[in-house]
Image (cartoon, coloured by chain):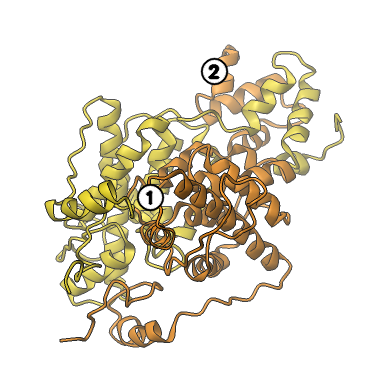
Chain colours: A orange, B yellow
Amino acid sequence: MMEKNLTRREFLVGTGSFAAGAAVGAVLGGGVFGLLDVQAAETVAPPAPWKYVKLDPEVVRKKGWEMYWQGGCMKGAAGAIITELQEKVGFPYTMLPLEVFRYGSAGIGGWGTICGAANGAAYAMGLVLPNADISTLVSELLGWYSETALPTSKHDAYAKYPTTVQSVAGNPLCHTSVSKWCDASGLREDSDERKDRCAKITGDSAARAVELLNAYFDKTFAPVYKISAETESCRACHVTRMSDTLTKMECAPCHPNAHKK
Amino acid sequence: MMEKNLTRREFLVGTGSFAAGAAVGAVLGGGVFGLLDVQAAETVAPPAPWKYVKLDPEVVRKKGWEMYWQGGCMKGAAGAIITELQEKVGFPYTMLPLEVFRYGSAGIGGWGTICGAANGAAYAMGLVLPNADISTLVSELLGWYSETALPTSKHDAYAKYPTTVQSVAGNPLCHTSVSKWCDASGLREDSDERKDRCAKITGDSAARAVELLNAYFDKTFAPVYKISAETESCRACHVTRMSDTLTKMECAPCHPNAHKK
């Protein structure tokens, strides 16, 4: 089992956790670190949640805008937070792949479902929160996304275009968010201005996630998003009494004729 | 900088990539492996895409169902594929955290946006595909999810309930998918049968992702999902000519009154 003749390339690429661990174990000869200890440090993710240190939302906001141009909205939002934690904490954040998040661009493969900026920021939140609190904080992020006029005007020092038009998405879906902004701005989805707008929202979503996390770890977090009275009246039957659906999104925009004959 | 007195715990937990790398480098004394090489193998994610080996969709399907009960739909779908790759490939898949995917449960924090099974399976696809092909294959997964009667009946040997009711979601949103099934089954969203249904779809989505990946790496992948003629007629103006939106979802369900006075 102790493959002493592993080539350097095989070691670096890693042909299996045991083989890689065994190679180092063999070299160390069970000296300072035992075989299993080295293997664990090298190739196994530590238990959740991972260590969080408070980050500067403004640093993350700018980084999100920048990283958008290197792989899209989800990569930008997740990457802005993860690369900051790589700098401030290091391992295990250094183990996370970032190119994978390209899958979330344009609401996942161009489908316009969840905004990739929200999806990526939520992933990063999931890394550092205890299981019991993930849903509450991620839900708050999506509530903020839905009701806030975006993008913020905090990117003007470096963005391609000034923030002259903001829009309220109404829900966290890429399709709705982009459509509302196109309507408000009169600009095209395939314009460079729209991409710059989404780059800004990438930074804004990552920054908001960091604000929520900082508050959580300061023990000052309190949810502020409230579902509208109109939607709560739908939920009283459809979520609570009949329990025939599941959502926190506003009902009326997609169901304008509900209960109308 | 060479912290030779790092405790074993500090080494294992990792207080920073350089510190951890330096500790091993110091022990190795620059012998078989140089400092930077060991550091890289230990704490830095290899470049994308990661190595894929063909997986058995039926093994992944069952594992997805099982893992759903250990952390929800997104964790189940991503985890089914990732843990299989941990077994078959090992490193670097062993470095990936899985608890993080709890963020995607119930369409992300209960919002009912993207189905977590689709979100998690798409994440796993993003790990192994070249950047240029991620969107195409992930889009195909979401197309399959939208138009397929789910869950499949392939879980009856182990699931809590037989698959007696299937429904077609029409889009990849958790909210729509769950609502259609509640309507078809007459069962409640908060029922154990609904959870079992979502556990099955977790397995089905992971299995479909594996089928798509196996075909891709066999060079037999060809997209089959087609946007409906009705929606293409909307897209001819709204996506192509006017470019005022972004989506592949069906238009009519949420916009029943479009162009009607």
Q: Amino acid at mark 2?
A: Glu
Residue drawn at x 67%, y 32% as measured from the top left: A38
Above or below, comparing residue B176 to residue B47 in the picture: below
Q: Position of residue B202 (x, y in %)?
A: 32, 55
Q: Quadrant of residue A97?
A: top right
Horizontal relation, residue B40 to residue B175: left or right: right
Query: Disc 1 or disc 2, which is closer to the eye?
Result: 1
In front of the other: A218 or B186: A218
Closer to the chain start, of discs 1 and 2, is: 2
In front of the other: B106 or B258: B258
Q: Quadrant of residue A132?
A: bottom right
- Estimate how packed mark 2 is, as few (under 14), some (14 to 19) or many (20 or more) residues with alpha carbons within 10 Å: few
Badge 2: chain ID: A
Q: Amino acid at mark 1?
A: Glu
Above or below, comparing residue A28 to residue B155 in the picture: above
Position of the C terminus of chain A by quadrant = bottom left
Q: Position of residue B55 (x, y in %)?
A: 32, 35
Label 1, label 2: how far apart the Cα atoms are: 46 Å
Q: Position of residue A203 (x, y in %)?
A: 58, 52
Name the residue that disc number 1 marks. Answer: A189
For residue B152, the mark is none
- Estimate how packed mark 1 is, as few (under 14), some (14 to 19) or many (20 or more) residues with alpha carbons within 10 Å: many
Residue drawn at x 49%, y 71% as measured from the top left: A147
Name the residue that disc number 2 marks. Answer: A10
Residue drawn at x 58%, y 25% as measured from the top left: A20
Position of the N terminus of chain A by quadrant = top right
Badge 1: chain ID: A
